[in-house]
Amino acid sequence: MNLLREPFVLLLASLLVAWAVFMGHQPPAARPAEVPDTEFSAVRAEAVLQALYADGVPHPSGSAANHAVRDRLLNLLREYGYQPEVQRRFHCNAAVAACSPVENIIALRQGSNPEQAILLTAHYDSGWAGPGVSDDGAGVAAVAEIARMASTRGPFEHDVIFLFTDAEEQGLIGADAFARHHELFKRVRSVINLEARGSTGASAMFETGDGNRGIIRMLAKNLDRPVANSLTYEVYQRMPNDTDFSVYKPYGVAGVNFAFTDGAAIYHSRIDDLQHLDRGSLQHHGQNAWALLLAMDERALEKLVSSEDAVYIDLFGHSLLHYPVSSAVGMTLVLSVLVMIAIRRTFSRQVVFRQMVWTLWGCIVLSIGLPAAGWLLSWPLGRWVDMHALQHPYPWLARATLLAAALWLIFRVLKMLAPRASTGSVMSTCWVLFSLSALALAYTVPSASFIAVLPLLGFTLGLLLDGFRWKKHPRLSFAGLFGFLAAVYLGFYLFFMLDVVVNFDQSQYRILPLLFPAVAVLPLLVWFMDKREPGRAFDYLMGLVVIGGCVGQQFLPAYTSNVPRDMTPVYRQFVAQGADQADQAWLVLESRSGEIDRAFASEHGFTPQPIPRFDRPAEVQAARSMPALELPRVAWQLDQQADRAEGGTAQAPHRYQLQLQVPAEVQLLMLSFSGAADLRLAEVAGQQAWDASAAQQHQRNAQHVMINRPGSGVLNVSFEVAGDAAFDLGLVSRYALPADVTAPLESEWPANAQYAFLGPRALQYQQIRVQPR
């Protein structure tokens, strides 16, 4: 059985597992249009997408382009036999201090039980820079195609609400308007939300709610290609990110959030278009949502919320391993005891305390050395080139370099251990560490306990093949091998998962998941090092691979036409404070996630210079000064109300009334309060736009109040600020950037750079000094 412990065999097995992990998380092939309506077809959904987004232009909420998408979607739903409703209102989401006009589109498929409903939803507005075909046109097309499929099916048990929300990109405003002001939401018991943060990849279930045990069982039973793990959900809850599903969760409804996240460089960019959307991702989106919709319809919806959460992880994207959180500690104890008993009985004469201490030192070296090596490699792999924050167009060379560094470090630790520790001592120490880690996670973060439980489970399954026949298999060959392969699966699962979080400029995090297989392989190879004592050849080989990878990375382009840098022209105009002063204006090349094209900037007269910022020090950006554009100006009048606050007490906030005369050309207004202002409350057009006393999850910066498409005419804004300190109130108005400003740049715009995020725009800054009485 020593063949199972040969380094080449273990390396080959590891690479096969890594390949299977990677391929298991690729989206499925698109199903053709000819499949029956009982199956979701990405080809049919793509036709819907082409009809809705044929013009390929950005369509942010409230724009004429978004109205065109709205009308096409309404006509499509009518063709399917629905009588869609448009929920129109001006609405503010006080959780994010943002307001916008909203036009939600709602279609209802009535079921036998009108008391409860399933909500299937996506948002149809886009960001400012691109047509939003992936985010969230793919979700819209999938929901629309499922609505058509539902119309040809027999009666559902529950009502099914197909909701296409508006103004999601402005701050989840459409979803909040539906939840707060539409009667149908009172019947919603479960939600399926479709989103995207890229243009390709598997449609992963990355968020669910509390009491998700029943939902996870349903996913495991009904999805052909489940991609999900409870660690992602645990991390996501701690991030300042939100989707429409974030609005519905506090109401106690069960539900899931699906998204594909590869191709992050295209997210919110000008090329988030039909050409860059992966059909397979659209297929995965739709088949997940359709299968889950049918499964939910067969259940009593009030029972979907369980009394506890689940721990879960997918296995190669084809099945879902899951268990209740309540069993995490007990399961970990049982597995740990079995592993320790097996090792103790097998290596009773080989376990020596001093040797275990040496092994512990080896594991500590791996724990410190791997992230240290990753940190050192961050410079050649990610910082010597201007790289996108989340994606490299050619990642495999850097991945191989990190793997080679990990292999070299494992080799050096084995060289240290071989003359000092036996197989039994090494195996005992390593698997005690796995057991202790599993117990610590089970007690502190049970939803992440699978990180250590999975290797323990693999080891235990291997014991079944070893059959506890101690004399025939004295080294627990299958147990050690299966435990190692489970650790390899976990390591590469997390290694690839980190692609959507960090790039190679933070390789200390990218390499860290390889610690799991690094520790698990020590007991399998320590005997080999002791018997054969490899020479320096391996050191030289891994050194050459690492050096070659670092050098080769410098010759790979950091950006391509399909993985572009974000670079956007932005006009900034600062209105003069006095009559004897002139407005200042610059054209700036903005980049929020990467670096601008310096050669292009230099050729077109953009130089690094400090650009004023309203509420913080000037920021150095690539810019060139230019004459101020004749933009219409927002007129304002600020009044401090006579009653300082309720009861007129000294502790109550000051209340102000701001009357704005808004030109029709204004696309968006932002009220920006300087750091000296303690904003407590804001109201826009009589609606609460911010309340600092409300305990809102994922609150954004309360120093800004956004008003999308404020319309022309008078707009009333009131706000309360605590304290007696004077402060500055910035009034930032967004306009369309005139074509004659960008035309000279467009003709020579680099192919590897695209407009992104807020897109090209003209910004006008006015400053209002507020002195409390």
Image (cartoon, rainbow, N blue to C red):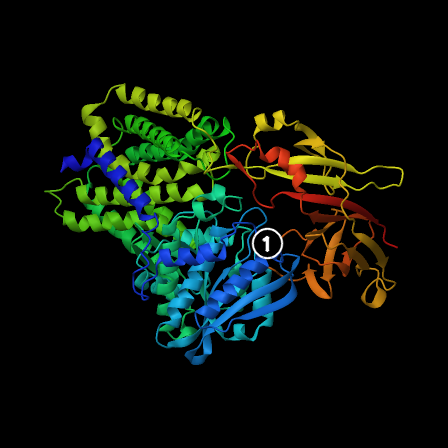
Q: Nearer the viewer, residue 741 or 592?
A: 741
The quadrant where residue 67 appears: bottom right
- Whether residue 422 appears in this view of the structure is no
Check disc 1 and report its element: helix, strand or loop. loop
Residue 331, by quadrant, is bottom left
Left or right, 280 with reference to 77: left
The spot of residue 770 in percent (x, y) is 83, 50
- The C terminus - image quarter: bottom right
Residue 262 rendering spot, x and y as whole percentages? 43, 45
Q: How many marks?
A: 1
Q: Residue furthest left?
A: 472
The quarter of the image holding the N terminus is: top left
Going by the image, does 613 lie left or right of 594?
right
Nearest to the observer: residue 206 or residue 668? 668
Q: Position of residue 292 (x, y in %)?
A: 37, 65
Residue matched to label 1 = 60
Amino acid under label 1? Pro
Label 1 CA crowd tier, 10 Å (few <14, some 14–19, many 20+): many
Q: Nearer the viewer, residue 745 or 458?
A: 745
- Residue 617 lies, in percent from the top left, at 72, 37
- Please say whether residue 169 is visible from this viewpoint: yes
Residue occupying image coordinates x 58% and y 28%: 600
Instruction: From this view, report whether residue 749 is shown above or below residue 670.
Output: above
Residue at 28% of width from left, 26% of height from top? 415
| Above or below: residue 157 compared with residue 176 | below
Residue 47's place in the image compared with 362, above or below, is below
